[in-house]
Amino acid sequence: MNYQIVILIVFALFALKEAIHFGLFNKASEDRSDGIVEIASTILLFAFSQPLILFLAALSMNVIFPEYEGALANTAIGIQILLLLIFDDLTQYWWHRCCHSFRWLYNLHRAHHNAKYMSVRIVFRNNFFYYAIMPSLWCSGILIYLGLGWVYTFYLVVKLTVIIGAHAEWKWDKALYQNKYTSKPMWLVERLISTPSTHSSHHGYNDEDGITTYKGNYGNLLFFWDVLFGTAKITRGYPSQYGVKGMLKATWPEQLFWPVVPSALDKKKRLAKQAETIQ
């Protein structure tokens, strides 16, 4: 079965669960532009950005290193998984962390946090250029060229299942925390992979609530990277509010296509410079 179909099925199952128990659309805190951003960004990623990047990465390797095509195809599966965890997931951890450390990069990632709710809808909600220059996608393309295609397929299904589950409004980990038989094993699980609790903390609105962390919980598949690099915050709680605190409202074209579409702040700065020039 094509991995994209499997991912679609996983997404649909989480979406169905959310729709039944919470409502998938018309969230109390959403505005009219949210649906546009989420639909457009998801289509752009899967129909354009991801396949194009993987193709261009393989094409570049074919031009520069044609003799290495399939060079790692016969290596042990464990080694191939390790390579993907390092060059895809660890690289994405640092990319995500950088996007929260530098303002111009955050503008590429802001759309993801602009949503005032958690939902499967926001999993792929990001600026077009956020994905276009994402290092981990380019690294994945190179690894596929080197022969990791089949392992990458299964790896991606597992990774996106974890990521979709971490963003869903349905908190699958909550019952496991409360159950006396699973509460202790969850100590290991929540330090190994991203869960709704740890990732919801990253999306929280108010860092004074004791749960939200603006500068942490960056992991995608493995939360272990946060544990390893000291950016983990584990509370087993969930913020009561989500979104971007203290930021100017962004239009849907800005969220999707900044810097081609400038922000309100960019416009204010430009007008201020023009005023200084006139004076």
Image: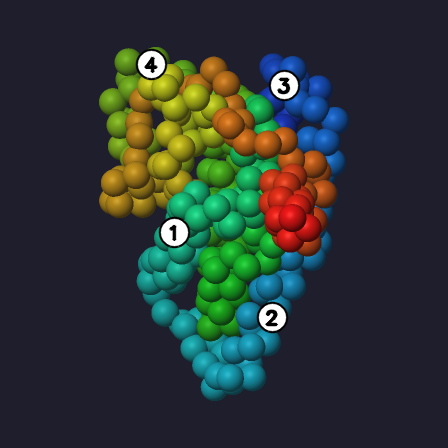
Looking at this rendering, what residue extends furthest in the bottom direction? 67
Which comes sooner in the sequence, label 4 or label 1? 1
Q: From mark 4 to mark 3, how far is it between C-alphas? A: 31 Å
Task: Give the residue at mark 1.
Answer: 94
Which-is-in-front pick, marks 4 and 2?
Answer: 2
Which-is-in-front pick, marks 1 and 2?
Answer: 1
Three-letter code for the amino acid on which mark 4 is drawn: Asn
Give the quarter of the image for residue 88. Answer: bottom left
Three-letter code for the amino acid on which mark 3 is drawn: Ser
Which comes sooner in the sequence, label 3 or label 2? 3
Side of 240 relative to 7 (left or right): left
Task: Give the residue at mark 2.
Answer: 56
Task: Give the residue at mark 3.
Answer: 29
Q: Secondary structure at mark 1?
A: helix
Residue 54 or residue 207, whichever sits in front: 207
- Would you say residue 276 is visible in this rendering? yes
Side of 143 relative to 18 (left or right): left
